[in-house]
Image (tube, rainbow, N blue to C red):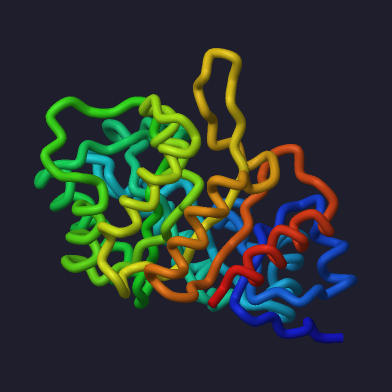
Amino acid sequence: MTAAPASPCVGIGWRQPHYETLLAERPALGFIEVHSENFFADGGITLAVLEAGRAAYDVSLHGVGLALGSAAGLDDAHLERLARLARRVQPRWVSDHACFARVGTGLHAADLLPIPFTDESLALMATHVQQVQERLGRPMLVENISAYVGWAGDTLAEPEFFNELTRRSGCGLLLDVNNLFVNARNAGLAPGDAAGEAMRWVDAIRPGSVGEIHLAGHCEQDDGLVIDDHGSRVRDEVWRVYEHTLQRLGPLPTLIEWDTAVPDLAVLLAEGQRARALHP
């Protein structure tokens, strides 16, 4: 039994609660995404499950551990495991985040920490992205993150930073629309104004540089802090930003992320159907 085709290209994050159901039902999806680091082992049942998923769908490898913006440099062992996995499953995309995490010779924060938007930071990240791409033998995608603190002395606007990064390195942008909205809310904007600010961010990005879009849910704490927790349906304001993004940049492969309080597979598929319905 093979998976039914899905067009436009919309996928879902394939997480452990849905391994068995997805392989049994083979719903119509453009692709599935997994977190790269969960499949770094050389063998075993987890890797066998991924290979079964790859036989049915295109796969996107989305990482959280490269720490592309770390002044300490890349972890060669981590990069080699990623390259080995990519050779094995031949993914449609390989991606990671515009963040730092590594400090010194071995300390890793296990978090996506924000980078400064400066010329120095840009040069460092472009070098690291090029190193990754050379090891993989393919372009990668770099995702904008949700950030809860920032750096003093930024000299580049975030879209300008990504425009120049994609020009210099040849990578693509993985545009997380929810992260744009979350950051605008945490800057003190009301939901409607935050959606407008996120749209202006999209308007500033270079057409043709975006390779994929991420959509996810978020939550708001009692103190007003908005958290990108990937634990609920996509909010209406984020759907508005997504629709604007498609109108501005054209139809793009889109992923529904859901990583906490993972619901039934049918809920993710319904979110994917909503995304497909908005494609022009």
Identify whether 221 is placed above or below 191.
Answer: above
Could you say which is closer to the camera, residue 58 or residue 177? Answer: 177
Q: Is residue 119 left or right of residue 19?
A: left
Q: Can residue 88 be seen here?
A: no
Q: Is residue 156 left or right of residue 50?
A: left
Residue reaching furthest to the top: 223
The image quarter containing residue 217 is top right
Q: Position of residue 237 (x, y in %)?
A: 55, 45
Q: Quadrant of residue 59?
A: bottom right
Which quarter of the figure is the N terminus placed in?
bottom right
> In the orientation shown, which residue stands out farthest toward the front?
192
Quarter-of-image position of residue 229: top right
* Residue at figure coordinates x 27%, y 41% from the top left: 70
Residue in view at x 32 percent, y 51 percent: 200
Residue 265 screen position, x and y as percent: 82, 57
- Above or below, 183 against 9 in this view is above
Q: Residue at x 71, y 67 (%)?
A: 273
Task: Write the residue at 70% across / 74% down.
Answer: 29
- In the image, residue 84 lies at what x, y percent? 49, 68
Q: Nearer the viewer, residue 86 or 269?
A: 269
Q: In the rendered view, does 136 fall on the left or right side of 263?
A: left
**Pick the front one: 80 or 272:** 272
Residue 219 appears in the rendering: yes
Q: Position of residue 239 (x, y in %)?
A: 57, 54
- 201 vs 222, left or right, is left
**Quick one: quadrant of the C terminus?**
bottom right
